[in-house]
Amino acid sequence: MSDFIPLSVPNLSGNELEYLIDAVKSGWISTSGGRISEFEEKLAQYLKVKKVAAIQSGTAGLHLAMILSDVGYGDEVIVPTLTFIAAVNPARYLGAEPIFMDCDDYLCLDIEKVADFCEKECDFKRGKLINKTTGKHIKVIVAVHVFGNIVDMYALMKLAQKYNLTVIEDATEALGSYNKETGDFAGAVGDFGVYSFNGNKIITAGGGGAVTAKSSALVDRAKYLSSQAKDDDVRFVHNETGYNYRMTNLQASIGLAQLEQIEEFIGIKEKNYALYKAAGLNLLGFQKNIRSNKWFYSLITDDRDGLIKRLQENNIQSRPIWTLIHTLRPYKQCQSYKIDKAIKYWGKVVNIPCSTNLTKDDIAYVASKIQ
Ligand SMILES: *Cc1c(COP(=O)(O)O)cnc(C)c1O
């Protein structure tokens, strides 16, 4: 058994080192090189989408998706309060303001409340959803697929269509989750889908991300903007303001090796989840109509801080879920709408170790310290 059991660490037992050494030997270590396009093709194949653009991070992907959704100064975007901050900050990069929404019992965006907000708190005029409180134009909904669950995308797309909103799926935590009835992967239903390959995600590239979009032309635009909007690579002509957001060949090398193992990782996540359940832990379920990647396990407890402390004393890392963003200093002045479930779950959920390299003994040990 391990001396210390971390919450979530990468599993690098595949071809990572081999591909990385190949890349170093080839000299292609920066934002050009064959592994990047290979990674894009394999990821698109896996997700059953036409195209993806590989970039530096999930945050960069969300930023690009918002730029391509025409979010700008004075606009507003609908976001969940229960999420990692990277789903919200890009709105601010563009001078837009977030409006915070509640979650449902799977910790995902409560679509009924969003619909309620649009109907009661907004006017729909000349094709634009206008917030009655601020008079501002709401352009985007960010749907975050929390911990491997999937926001009800079909209901959300209907709502978005009704109010002429663009939907950005933050699928950074749900790569590999899909709807069992339709086969649609998380990130492949909205106008944009964003992925992350940060060290703690289901697969990692050390850091990195990807964007897909319903429109292939918009994926091309994302790639263009991520490469400094370079229109001529001899004379360095840039016809737009671009970003240095392209993935590197080193990241893509690790990413490719990880992608080869994703289904294996999801299998282990499922098995470990079942072991914890069998040990009697009160874990939040995953939606029945999806194949979830079961990325993070959420234990429900009435003694959140006491449990975290007890686990820490036993060399087990655990964490409460994120402090709700509508309560954080940069955002507490922003509008929020009927948030109650998020507050309830924030007080009750503890994420427990979920790495794919946990042993059976590790899991039994963690479970014994929780009971
Ligand atoms: C990880 C994560 C991101 C950001 O990904 P990075 O690659 O770290 O920038 C965005 N949103 C959510 C919900 C995440 O969990």
Image (cartoon, rainbow, N blue to C red):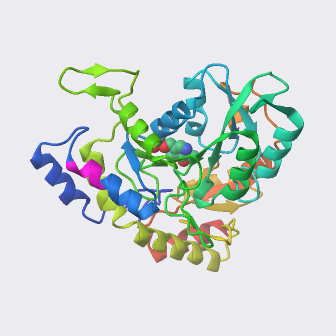
When asked about the image quadrant of residue 335, the answer is: top right
When asked about the image quadrant of residue 122, the answer is: top right
Q: Nearer the viewer, residue 303 or 277?
A: 277
**Residue 46 part of the magenta segment:** no
Q: Is residue 168 above or below residue 371?
A: above
- Identify the residue at horizontal 79%, vertical 28% (top origin): 130
Compared across the picture, whether 74 is left or right of 353 comes to: right
- Identify the residue at horizontal 33%, vertical 66% (top origin): 260
Picture coordinates of residue 257 (x, y %)?
Answer: 29, 61
Picture coordinates of residue 121 (x, y %)?
Answer: 86, 34
Q: Is residue 96 above or below residue 223?
A: above
Picture coordinates of residue 341 (x, y %)?
Answer: 80, 50
Q: Is residue 363 above or below residue 252?
A: below
Is there any visible trace of residue 55 in the rendered image? Answer: yes
Q: Nearer the viewer, residue 181 or 97?
A: 181
- Identify the residue at horizontal 47%, vertical 60% (top origin): 5
Picture coordinates of residue 155 (x, y %)?
Answer: 73, 56
Compared across the picture, whether 227 is left or right of 347 comes to: left
Q: Is residue 9 above or below residue 181?
A: above
Region rendered in magenta? 34-38
Quarter of the image for the C terminus: give it: bottom right
Quarter of the image for the N terminus: give it: bottom left
Q: Nearer the viewer, residue 233 or 102?
A: 233
Q: Main secondary structure of the magenta part?
A: helix
Is there any visible trace of residue 310 in the rendered image? Answer: no
